[in-house]
Image (cartoon, rainbow, N blue to C red):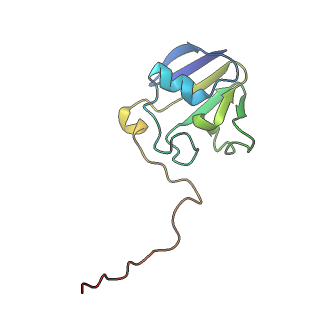
Amino acid sequence: MIVEVISGGKRCYLQTPAEALLSDCLLDSGFMEGTECGGQGVCGKCAVKVHSGELAPAGEEPAQARTNGRVLACQSLIKEDVVIEIACGRDDIKRKVCLPGLQRQERFEDTPVEKH
């Protein structure tokens, strides 16, 4: 399979086997530095915009639904040739993304510790 990566207006072509995890392809080629969640699909750092081609959900549960054409690379298997766009700067790669439903709703208060 061919993965065409658009980053900063430049195009790069990567060869990868079918059924490979998109994030593994991007990590191996140096386009991604890793994720905070270890590929669990919760931090959002690996979000990419899909211009063409199909990606399949990894695992039994469906991958996070596309939002504005974006998917999580760590939750997407390459099924065919695909064209994706990723953030172009190191600041963009290191950003933290707040995904819906992951913010704590409750605040926990610590009880004071008494010394005896």
- Identify the residue shown where x is 58% and y is 57%: 100
Q: What is the quadrant of residue 108 in the picture?
A: bottom left
- In the foreground, 77 or 112: 112
Whether 41 is drawn above or below 108: the answer is above
Question: From the image, which quarter does the N terminus lie in?
Answer: top right
Whether 53 is drawn above or below 39: the answer is above
From the top left corner, tell me how far across and down residue 82 is, in percent: 66, 22
From the top left corner, tell me how far across and down residue 66 is, in percent: 67, 42
Whether 64 is drawn above or below 17: the answer is below
- Identify the residue shown where x is 44% and y is 25%: 8
Question: Is 20 on the left-hand or right-hand side of 7?
Answer: right
From the top left corner, tell me how far across and down residue 58 is, in percent: 69, 36
- Identify the residue shown where x is 61% and y is 18%: 3
From the top left corner, tell me how far across and down residue 111 is, in percent: 37, 82
- In the foreground, 77 or 59: 59
- Identify the residue shown where x is 52% and y is 62%: 103
Question: From the image, which quarter does the C terminus lie in?
Answer: bottom left
- In the foreground, 57 or 65: 57
Which residue is the extreme one toward the left? 116
Which residue is the extreme one toward the front? 116
Q: How many marks overall?
A: 0
